[in-house]
Image (tube, helix red, strand yellow):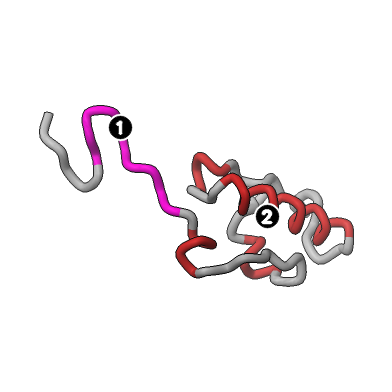
Amino acid sequence: MGKRNGDSVFGKRRKSCPFTAAGIKHIDYKNIDTLSQFVTERGKIIPRRITGVSLRHQRMLTRAIKKARYMALLPFVASE
């Protein structure tokens, strides 16, 4: 029951937001490399409980992904 590598009695430690750590204040819809890290192969947006993104940045990320999809920079679904 000892603590190891961030584990505690209550579970794993919460991940820190990669955007806050990098000092990014605005997520641009044209930055496809960054956006594609938060989308699955199927085209679904990965939830923040898995990625560790803060609520504010998750909302900005969702808007940017949807805008990139609308502008045809990201696919809505994966091609088979």
Res 14 quadrant in image: top left
Mark 2 touching mark 1, by CB under 8 A? no
Q: Which residue is mark 1?
A: 11
Q: Position of residue 64 (x, y in %)?
A: 75, 58
- Identified at 80% across, 53% down, the residue is 66
**Residue under label 2:** 61
Q: Is residue 80 left or right of residue 41?
A: right
Residue 40 vertical position relative to residue 35 in the rendered view, above or below: above
Tag 2 secondary structure: helix
Please say whether residue 53 is one of the residues in the magenta stretch. Answer: no
Three-letter code, disc 2: Leu
Instruction: Find residue 58 and report its horizontal and vertical position in percent.
Output: 63, 49
Earlier residue among tags 2 and 1: 1
Residue at (59% x, 45% y) in the render: 55
Q: Which mark is residue 52?
A: none
Can you give x and y, in whole percent of width and height, for residue 8 in the image?
22, 35
In this rendering, the count of numbered labels is 2
Q: Looking at this view, is 41 or 38 the one in front? A: 38
**Residue at point 88%, 57% (across, down):** 70
- Sort mark 1 into few (<14), some (14-19) or many (20+) by Cα contacts within 10 Å: few
Question: In which quadrant of the rendered image does the N terminus lie?
Answer: top left
Residue range corresponding to the magenta coloring = 7-16
The amino acid beneath tag 1 is: Gly
Q: Residues within 10 Å of mark 2 (few under 14, many from 20)?
A: many
In the visual, does 65 lie left or right of 33? right
